[in-house]
Image (cartoon, rainbow, N blue to C red):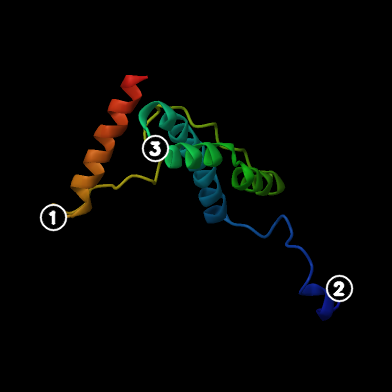
Amino acid sequence: MTPATSATAPPSAAAYNATDVAFTSGMIRLEGQARALSGLVTAHTGSTQLRGYATQFGDDTTDSQYMSGLMQQWHQILPSPYQPGAGMIPGTGPGRPPARTPWLARTSAQAAIWARMRHDL
């Protein structure tokens, strides 16, 4: 390969590391979680704008397909599909924030809303 062609050559399957695999696996799971959440919107909102967005988001699997393709190129096991009620995806939670974290109340409120939505189905 000459220097002129090396700049345009596609990356090899070996051009990844453990962080790449962890990120890609987490994003695939988060996309599944987001699609599950978007599926709840129609039963819990009167906003046609929000329903339209949720439908469009739920139907768009382009990112997940791309990331799944990367995992396959890297010969890595794909993460299991998101299962509602299975808990937080490892590494995505807020952890233990300082006592005076302003977003803590908002996060707790969002968790309570999500719990009510799941029980209203």
Quadrant in which the N terminus appears: bottom right
- Residue at 51% x, 51% y is 23
Say which residue label 1 marks: 100
Q: How far apart in space, not on screen, are marks 3 and 2 (Cα)?
A: 56 Å
Q: Quadrant of residue 78?
A: top right
Say which residue label 3 marks: 47
Q: Position of residue 116 (x, y in %)?
A: 28, 26
Q: Position of residue 92 (x, y in %)?
A: 38, 46
Q: Is residue 81 above or below residue 76?
A: above
Most extreme residue toward the left, as rendered? 100
- Residue at 44% x, 37% y is 48
Q: Amino acid at mark 1?
A: Arg
Dot 3 or dot 2: first in sequence order is 2
Answer yes or no: do the residues labelled 1 and 3 have beta carbons within 8 Å?
A: no
Q: How far apart in space, not on screen, are marks 1 and 2 (Cα)?
A: 57 Å
- Residue at 76% x, 63% y is 10
Answer yes or no: do the residues labelled 1 and 2 have beta carbons within 8 Å?
A: no
Q: Nearer the viewer, residue 44 or 4?
A: 44
